[in-house]
Image: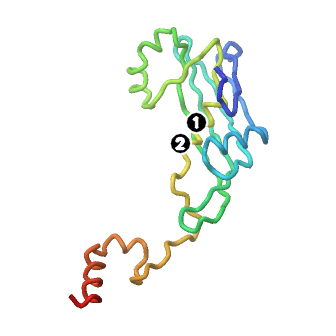
Amino acid sequence: MTENIELTRPFDVGSVPPEGTSETITATDEECSAIAARFGVEAVHSMSATIHLQPWKRGGFRARGEASANITQTCVVTLDSFETVVRAQLDQLFVARTSRLATDAVEVVVAHDEDDIGYIDDGEIELGEFAVEALCLELDPYPRKEGAELPVSSSGATGDDDAKVSPFAVLKQLNLKDGD
């Protein structure tokens, strides 16, 4: 269950009281380095999550909370490094793979309005992976440093305006230079 997981925090669901319980997890420096490699960012300086687990239906659990990570990314415009904080709201249902809830997962997902159901394996929920997956989905695939602007092109237009310039305009300029 914990193979290739950068942040493993198994939680025994047998210890959850009827009113629920809260757990706080924090990544070590070594785990932050592994998470940075997974995310494809320069560095993860810190990562933590606070998760409240509440019993749900018969044998299921609902996990809600927030995860955050302080990371260093590379700006796609300037190629400069910059720090940012990534936050993810956590809300997921967990059921045992062998339970009736797991076989009715499609209906449960639609009713809960979630993309996925998490599973309880050997009486445990993997809270670390749950938080890391949620943060990964919040990463900007094209991170921009605040204030970064696209450079001005040779035509004097910014990168955003280049989409409006016809590629044939460049060919027309070549034709005039050749004099043909």
Q: How is the image coloured?
A: rainbow
Q: Position of residue 13 (x, y in %)?
A: 66, 16
Give the Cα separation between the discs numbered 1 and 2: 6 Å
Residue shown at 47% from the left, 13% from the top: 101
User: Which amino acid type corresponds to the residue marked 2 in the rendered image?
Assistant: Leu
Is residue 30 shown left or right of residue 157? right
Q: Relative to 31, say whether 111 is above or below.
A: above
Q: Relative to 56, say whether 52 is above or below.
A: below
Q: Position of residue 77 (x, y in %)?
A: 54, 66
The image quadrant where one finds the N terminus is top right
Q: Relative to 12, say whether 65 is above or below.
A: below
Pick out the residue farthest to the right.
Answer: 29
The residue lying toward the viewer, choosing from 5 and 27, is 5
Q: Quadrant of residue 59?
A: top right
Mark 2 lies on a secondary structure that is helix
User: Which amino acid type corresponds to the residue marked 1 in the rendered image?
Assistant: Glu
Pointer 1 and pointer 2: residues touching (CB < 8 Å)?
A: yes
Q: Residues within 10 Å of mark 2 (few under 14, many from 20)?
A: few
Q: Quadrant of residue 67?
A: top right
Q: Residues within 10 Å of mark 1 (few under 14, many from 20)?
A: few
The image quadrant where one finds the C terminus is bottom left
Is residue 21 shown left or right of residue 119? right
Q: Position of residue 96 (x, y in %)?
A: 55, 13
Q: Which mark is residue 137?
A: 2
Residue shown at 65% from the left, 43% from the top: 37
Residue shown at 60% from the left, 31% from the top: 130
Mark 1 lies on a secondary structure that is helix
The residue lying toward the viewer, choosing from 81 and 53, is 81
Is residue 167 shown left or right of residue 4? left
Q: Quadrant of residue 68?
A: top right
> Which residue is identified by label 1?
133
